[in-house]
Image (cartoon, helix red, strand yellow):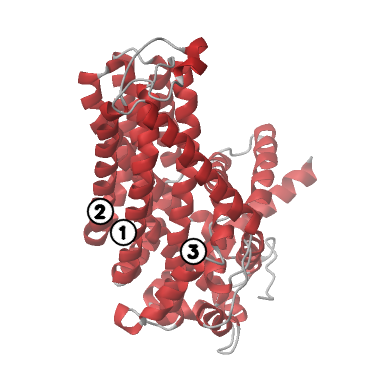
Amino acid sequence: MSLEIDAASSATISVDEVSLEGIQSENGSSVASFTNLNSEPRVWRDLFWLCIFLVHLMGLGFVVSILGINRFRAPDRLDIDRYTSGISDNQVGLTETYWPIFGAAGGIGAFMGFVWLFTLGLQGIQFMKISIHLLTTYLAVISVLCFWIKQLFWGITFSVGATLQFLYVLSVIDRIPFTMLVLQKAIEIVWNLPQVIRVSFGFMVVMLCWMVIWTFGAAGVVASSMGDSGRWWFLVVFSVSLFWTGAVLSNMVHVVVSGIVFLVLNHDARQASTIPQIPTLNSLKHAVTTSFGSICYGSLFTASIRTLRWEIRAVRSKIGNNECLLCLVDFLFHIVETLVRFFNKYAYVQIAVNGTSFNHSARDAWELLQSTGVEALVAYDCSGSVLLMAIIIGGLITGTSVGVYTWFRWRDRLMMVATTSMLMGMVLVSLALVIVESAVTSIYICFAEDPLMIQRWDAEFYDQMSEVFHQRLQYRSARRGFTIKLNQSN
């Protein structure tokens, strides 16, 4: 893409001009990308991170097996307690006491993923609107319950979460209509592609299989004779590992779905019958082989940077004319924007289509979005945060369900079991909803690379996107002009 848009003059450029200058020819990048996806051989990327991830999995698998076996059917079977005598509180438990509880959490989380996905297909927009407001209420209720059972730390944590969620929704309330429009079209795409839904369910099964091993060790930790501090440290390490593993599997689905959705938009195909099975298998093959290292690498950082960017953007949009605060937030914003250049979710579309390394893909995707001005549209969209709200609700329901049972059985282990179950639920629900996010990112990449792909697919949606696109360019131009005048006056 060769088009450069100056933010100070973008208000004078029409969306049609931007789109027409950004259109690739039939023999251009779109066709080349299609060829890459189907036939051109690929080389392995980011092998270092692939090795790190596999070593991490093997190491963690060994540790969780040892900790689980140590308390399986007999206390201290492997005589490990002698190494924890300094942090032991002499409590005796067995792995099989807590393992079924975590198994139930996995079952509830998978069920929530199925329910969430089918609800999106039937009443997607209504479900998303409910999720936005339900999360604040749910967090507030959980915080009250935590205070009631004298869990002050968790009560404060959930109350702060409820407050931040409420403030975030207020800051982006004007963006919700456009976000719902994009989500509706993304859901329409994936719902008409049954192979995409099968891929999501397949990776949920893979995650459940890994959780069988993971929860075996987690149950051994909860049942161990270590004190609370020792058990919490182990669970935190296990949770970080589970988060990374879940993110890797989610982004593998992301890559597979992005490749398929790109073909749908590129070939003006609304129905799954027009897409052959081979591209699905090719996308899956690339995700689990040559692109696996790139996925492992990006999964470590992308989610946290995205979340930080959402929060900073929400604060930045509501500062007004407070120069001191604006300066501080702009400083943080530019740091995060630099990180986003190398770690963003749009990289997975480039990985799926072109097979490049993660940093190369992230840089190319971000430069494409910025050079065409579509980044202004991406920044206005809140679909990622709305889907995250639905994921958190699924995790909270899982943790609450298991926590209520644990409260009546083992009150001293309540928060350990409940928070671990909540994370399990979030990971499983994210595997179900990531296909929608993949469709969203593919829509924006296609709109930036060749807007006619969106126009051929859905002309009405193209007109709506173009209208908002034009409005965002005007807004950015006005904001840039105000900043320049403010600096000149000072």
* Residue 431 visible in rendering: yes
CA distance separating discs 1 and 3? 16 Å
Say left or right for 16 vs 64: right
| Sequence-wise first label, 1 or 3 | 1
Badge 2 vs badge 3, beta-carbon distance below 8 Å: no
Image quadrant for the N terminus?
Answer: bottom right
x and y, in percent, of residue 46 in the image: 64, 59
Residue indicated by mark 1: 201
Q: Amino acid at mark 1?
A: Phe
x and y, in percent, of residue 369 in the image: 60, 65
Q: How many neighbours does mark 3 have within 10 angstroms: few (below 14), some (14-19), or many (20 or more)?
A: some
Q: Which mark is residue 288?
A: 3
Residue indicated by mark 2: 114
Badge 2 vs badge 1, beta-carbon distance below 8 Å: yes
Tell me the residue at 47%/70% (across/down).
285
Tell me the residue at 49%/65% (across/down).
287
